[in-house]
Image (cartoon, rainbow, N blue to C red):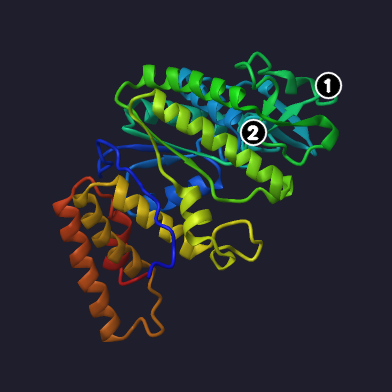
Amino acid sequence: MDFMLDVNIPSPQELLHYGQPVLLTGSCFTEHIGNSLQELKFDVLQNPHGILFDPASVASSLVSYVQNKQYSEADLFQLNEVWQSWQHHSRFSHIDARNSLELINASQQRAHEFLKRSEWLIITLGSSFSYRLTSQAPAPAQVGLNAAPGSEGAVANCHRAPGQWFRKHLMTIEEINTVLDNSLYQVLKFNPRLKVIFTVSPVRHIRDGVVENNRSKARLIEVVHHLTNKFDRLYYFPAYELVIDVLRDYRFYDIDMVHPNYPATRFVLEKFMKYFTDVESQQIAAEVQQIVIARKHKAFHPATAAHQKFLQSHLEKARELQKRYPFLSLAEEIDYFARGGQ
């Protein structure tokens, strides 16, 4: 007897494998996938703007990487003594505007160069709700209003600014399709080798309301399927359906009942590896995982002969794996084992 629904997950015509650069952008669930791939030593760059939730912000960021947009002080505003960018996560904020711009523009340059050589782009959309600036926002906030239709005045991060500075807008299917279609056209023209994987985040945006969250997710899913049918080399990975329709239980969520927990994210990653990576990469990943787990092991008695033997054994395994697959970056693990776990 089956105790859960099965989800059909079509594999791409070409599977992702080690040595192919992967750019990830989008919601916080992007970082679950990105961190896991990074830990397995895939060549990844994730969220150069920081976490982005809505399609307008994702589309705007991708176009900025293509154009290698360099930000100036006119793109910043000051709030509570800190300089911020409406288009970036607060990890780019700083009490000195020059330092903030250095962080932003360095990330822009990395993203531009990485996207140029990337083989894969993974986009995780979180919400159809977009926050738009009102006339009460500071003057520098008006920068970027000449955006694609459907994204005028959209901000990627509200930075806990006063609520009257924003208007909450549920993007229509047409608006979402317009901004994503336009950005994909530019991205694929910039890098014709690129393959794109869309996912919709299973994180519930309950602050919007349960009904509103479902409306929001439905619009994202509709547009993503329209785009994957329109463009070659665009694929859909059903992270949302795997959590909502296969696991479908609150025991797979954190205490906030909003974010999928560790078992849920591991389940999703296992499906991703099975259907979107080639067999050789799956085998390499399994070996890398053993090294990574050993690196994290904390011994109660590190001076014992048994622990030193454990370290030496994994040092030899890491060196042998690095020799077989030079594209892996195991220098940190090799150094750790070589220094006796220090």
Dots 1, 2 in contact, CB < 8 A:
no
> x, y percentage for residue 207?
73, 49
| Viewer can see residue 261 | yes
Residue lying farthest to the top in this orientation: 146
Please name whichever residue, 35 or 193, is drawn nearer the observer in this view of the structure: 193
> x, y percentage for residue 11?
30, 42
Residue at x 24%, y 69% (from the top left corner): 314
Residue at x 53%, y 62% (from the top left corner): 261
Mark 1 or mark 2, which has the lower sequence index? 1
Tell me where residue 147 sits by quadrant: top right
Q: Quadrant of the C terminus?
A: bottom left
Is 340 rendered above or below residue 11? below
Is 9 rendered above or below residue 259? above
Rounded to the nearest whole Å, what is the CA distance between mark 1 and mark 2? 17 Å
Crowd class of label 2 (few under 14; some 14 to 19; many from 20; radius 10 Å): many
Label annotation for residue 156: 2
In the image, 215: left or right of 180? right
Number of numbered tags placed on the structure image: 2
In the image, 279: left or right of 84? left
User: Which element type, helix, strand or loop, lies under badge 2?
Assistant: loop
Residue lying farthest to the front in this orientation: 1
> x, y percentage for residue 6?
39, 56
Q: Which residue is mark 1?
A: 135
Is 193 rendered above or below residue 329? above
Mark 1 residue type: Ser
Mark 2 residue type: Ala
Label annotation for residue 207: none
